Amino acid sequence: MKRPYSLRARTAVFIAATFTLLITLFALGSYFAIEHALLSRADNEARDQLRAILFALEHARVPDTAQIVAQHRSIGEARLELAIYTHAGDSSLLWADHPNVILSPYEHHALLTEQGRALNVRGKDRTYRALSVSTGSHVAIATFDLAVISEAEDAILRTFIVLLLIGIVGSAALGYFVAGLSLAPIRLLIKGARQLEVAGSSGITAPLLPVPHHVTEVAVLATAVNRLIAERDSSIAKLKTFTADAAHELRTPLTVLKGELEVELRLASPDEASYHIYQSNLEEVERLIVIVQDLLLLADLDGAAAREVPIADLSGALQRVLDRLQPLAQSNSVEIIASIEPSLHAHAEPDRLERMIDNLVHNAIVYSEVGGTVRVDLKSRGGHPSLIVEDNGPGIAESDLPYIFDRFYRTERARTRRFGGVGLGLAIVRSIADEYGFGIEIESTLGKGTIVELIFS
């Protein structure tokens, strides 16, 4: 898996890489241009000196070749080594001074016959530059050491390397700063998104994402996201309203239907076929009433307004729940092993606190295997009460864990008639925990069981 990195760092790297590429290309172009300029300048100076020598030889009444050569054999710090011939193409040598360079026949012929020819030749231990100048009666061939030019090129190259390193560091820092300025609107969106996330997990309504109108692309993105959030909130609000209204409307007819079935059941004889029909219908109506009551509770939790929260006896509430569920555990052949630290309290309304604990322990009993064990441990941990409910049931698949607190969600195993339920028990636990700011964690392994921990405030 690739290591994540921030968009700002990535942008800074791109800016630094682009700048480095540009400055490298510029440095290489400048280096070769300067090299060519230095070499051309040295060639021109050498030709000027050769022309001066040949001019002096042709116009002097009694030419002193050694003296003339001595006056015109320096170009900067380099010293010319000369060979002067009386006329082009002839081997009549007038002057020769090539102690460090031995020209090949091809090089010698090319310099004598090609006007203005210049080439690099290999000397005893380094590279030399060779060129020629001809007049009507003389040809001069000169060679000079390229060490001076090479030293200048090396100095320029070192300077470019230093500037390149400084440029890389500077461009990275500048790119990071510029990226920060450019991504400031994105940071606002990230901050707003985190506020939405925190608000969503705590049930608090949060403002929408800020819209930076001065940045067109980000403004369009923020507006689109805000529109989606508004549509989502509207859909959720409509769904909650529908659930509450439907539950309220169903409560009365179900109560009436239950009463009528109870009357019919009392009047009917157990031997009559209608008796068993009434009994079955009564069980289903009671089941529907429980569902409606759960929906009403969820609707009440959804619309709960901020109010002062009392302090409830957590240890006592847990003990009452265990006493109430003990018959269920015995009927399912499940043993409850409890460890309750006394005098622990939680900020919650007592009835909702018991309902939350009841749902957790009830689930653990129902889903445990016959002859299994449910462990309930209440203790103080890190300054806060902690309730751990552990069963050795079938466990929950990893793919189901993110959804088990959703309303009406049931795993494949929970859909069997034996377990019953409609998927509202854990949804109620989550809603009550969110209302009072309790933490809830769940771990489960298929074939081994499930552990649920509540951390109270």
Image (tube, rainbow, N blue to C red):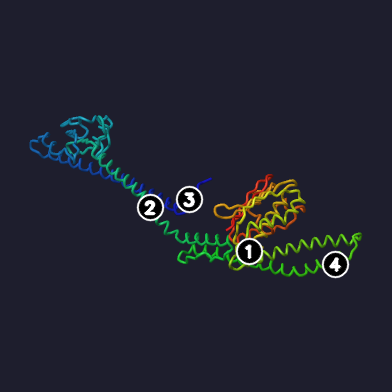
- Between residues 27 and 59, which one lies in front from this camera angle? 27
**Identity of the amino acid at label 2?**
Ala
**Quick one: label 4, few (<14), some, or many (20+) residues within 10 Å?**
few
Task: Find the distance from the CA under tag 4 to the CA under tag 2.
Answer: 84 Å
Can you give x and y, in whole percent of width and height, for residue 205 in the image?
57, 66
> Which residue is at a point 69% across and 44% down the rendered structure image?
447
- Between residues 139 and 52, which one lies in front from this camera angle? 52
Label 3, on which residue? Answer: 5
Does the CB distance between marks 3 and 2 fall below 8 Å?
no
Res 348 quadrant in image = bottom right
User: Tag 1, which secondary structure?
Assistant: loop
**Identity of the amino acid at label 4?**
Val
Does the CB distance between marks 1 and 3 fall below 8 Å?
no
Does the CB distance between marks 4 and 3 fall below 8 Å?
no
Task: Find the distance from the CA under tag 2 to the CA under tag 1.
Answer: 56 Å
Res 87 quadrant in image = top left
Above/below status of 81 relative to 257: above
Does the CB distance between marks 2 and 1 fall below 8 Å?
no
Label 4, on which residue? Answer: 263
Label 2, on which residue? Answer: 173
Label 1, on which residue? Answer: 349
> Which label's residue is closer to the chain start, 2 or 1?
2
Can you give x and y, in whole percent of width and height, for residue 342 in the image?
62, 54
